[in-house]
Image (cartoon, rainbow, N blue to C red):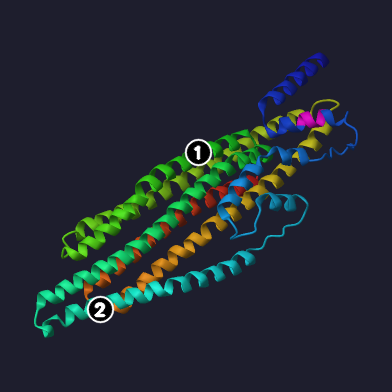
């Protein structure tokens, strides 16, 4: 009977060493903790090696390259502060900086708004007073020239908004490519290999789909919608059905993509931590029953799991803040672009031609769709991290 228990204990220890789970790491550290100097019987240990093993340097490098001088936040410093029991970042800092950024953007767009209003009023003058001039064709010619000037100005503004949205989504994808390996490793330490592998694979799928569909198909589709809307006003609404079809496709594709990806991540985030918890508890209870080393393995395992959860939570929250910083300012620019053209369309409608008001409304709709893409992309990644943090910390 004694030999049977000894053989069973040896097999369990070998399986723990080969499994790659958090408990196996705890068992290794627990067995070695009796021989290392400077460690007490409670299983305490220095977690600096664990923290340094997570590749946050690459995440920090990518984030600093993207944010420029717009924010002083550092994810590496934030994780260090959390591990030392302090957190220096405040959302109030981001909000105050955002208000200043909104004021600067609004002041920079005022001149564009005034030019749009002036051109809209001039176009209305050509149309409404062409009969008093005595030549209807002359008034129509003046309107088309003014409309082309207005279209050139709106096209320049839309191109700026398009570049802001495209760069924001690309920066977000590049940041997530750097963050996912580090966050997955922290999940491995705090929860288990199943959740870590599932999250890593899921995020690779999400990043690939967003890059393929949103960057390469949907964003160029917004350009097509903008051009069709401008042409539709010159062609007496002959492209109205096609324009509406393109807009519906852009909106519904975004919603379907968002629903599928968030739903899939939610299912993975709910199931995999439970499976890891069951597996870890089974191995841990078996290890605690081993004669001689059971108590040491159990105490060190609890400490290791708690430390892993702390590291995972710090990296996850730091990643959330980085996503907010990366997407906040582009969203501000896109929303100001949309609001400016909404105001322009509302103001010129009583005094100008309906085609001018419709063109301004279409430009505002294009900016709204671009802002929706940036918001949806950021929200997908935010929810993916929040789901993992909630589901793994509750177990």
Figure quadrant of residue 302: top right
Q: Which residue is mark 2?
A: 122
What percent of the width, then of the height, locates residue 165? 43, 55
What percent of the width, then of the height, locates residue 77? 71, 52
Q: Is residue 126 visible?
A: yes
Residue occupying image coordinates x 67% and y 29% = 20
**Quick one: SS at disc 2?**
helix
Residue occupying image coordinates x 76% and y 36% = 301
From which residue to which does the magenta span run?
27-31
Q: Is residue 349 visible?
A: no
**Relative horizontal placement of residue 358, taking residue 30 as reference (left or right):** left
Residue 28 magenta = yes
Give the quadrant of the N terminus. top right
Residue occupying image coordinates x 22% and y 73% = 354
**Relative horizontal placement of residue 310, taking residue 296 as reference (left or right):** left
Figure quadrant of residue 144: bottom left
**Relative horizontal placement of residue 295, taking residue 177 as reference (left or right):** right
**Magenta span: chief secondary structure:** helix
C-alpha span from label 1 to label 2: 52 Å
In front of the other: 286 or 236: 236
> Would you call the spot at circle 2 few (<14 residues within 10 Å), some (14-19), or many (20 or more)?
some
Residue 200 magenta = no
> Would you call the spot at circle 1 few (<14 residues within 10 Å), some (14-19), or many (20 or more)?
some
Figure quadrant of residue 196: top right
Do the CB atoms of the residues marked 1 and 2 lie less than 8 Å apart?
Answer: no
What percent of the width, then of the height, locates residue 80? 73, 50
Q: Which residue is mark 1?
A: 204
């Amino acid at each position: 009977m004694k030999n049977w228990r000894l053989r069973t204990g040896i097999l369990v220890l070998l399986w723990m060493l080969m499994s790659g789970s958090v408990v196996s790491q705890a068992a290794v550290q627990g067995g070695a903790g009796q021989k290392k100097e400077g460690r007490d019987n409670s299983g305490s240990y220095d977690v600096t090696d664990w923290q340094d093993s997570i590749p946050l340097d690459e995440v920090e490098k990518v984030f600093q390259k993207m944010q420029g001088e717009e924010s002083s936040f550092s994810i590496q410093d934030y994780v260090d502060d959390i591990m030392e029991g302090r957190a220096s970042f405040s959302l109030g800092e981001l909000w105050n900086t955002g208000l200043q950024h909104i004021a600067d953007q609004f002041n920079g767009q005022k001149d564009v708004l005034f030019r749009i209003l002036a051109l809209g009023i001039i176009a209305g003058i050509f149309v409404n007073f062409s009969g008093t001039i005595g030549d209807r064709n002359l008034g129509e010619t003046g309107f088309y020239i003014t409309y082309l000037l207005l279209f050139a100005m709106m096209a320049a503004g839309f191109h700026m908004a398009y570049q802001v949205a495209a760069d924001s989504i690309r920066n977000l994808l590049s940041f997530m490519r750097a963050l996912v390996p580090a966050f997955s490793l922290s999940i491995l330490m705090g929860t288990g290999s199943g959740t870590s592998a599932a999250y890593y694979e899921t995020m690779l799928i999400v990043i690939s789909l967003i890059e393929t569909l949103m960057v390469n198909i949907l964003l160029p589709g917004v350009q097509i919608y903008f051009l069709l809307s401008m042409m539709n006003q010159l062609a007496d609404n002959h492209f109205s059905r096609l324009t509406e079809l393109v807009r519906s496709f852009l909106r519904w594709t975004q919603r379907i993509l968002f629903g599928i990806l968030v739903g899939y991540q939610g299912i993975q985030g709910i199931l995999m931590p439970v499976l890891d918890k069951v597996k870890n508890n089974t191995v841990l209870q078996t290890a605690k029953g081993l004669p001689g080393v059971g108590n040491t393995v159990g105490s060190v395992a609890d400490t290791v799991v708690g430390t892993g959860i702390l590291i995972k939570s710090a990296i996850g929250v730091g990643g959330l803040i980085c996503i907010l910083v990366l997407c906040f300012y582009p969203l501000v620019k896109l929303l100001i672009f949309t609001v400016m053209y909404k105001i322009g369309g509302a103001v010129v409608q009583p005094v100008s031609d309906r085609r001018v008001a419709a063109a301004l409304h279409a430009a505002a709709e294009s900016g709204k769709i671009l802002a929706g893409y940036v918001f949806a992309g950021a929200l997908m990644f935010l929810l993916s991290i929040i789901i993992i943090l909630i589901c793994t910390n509750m177990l």
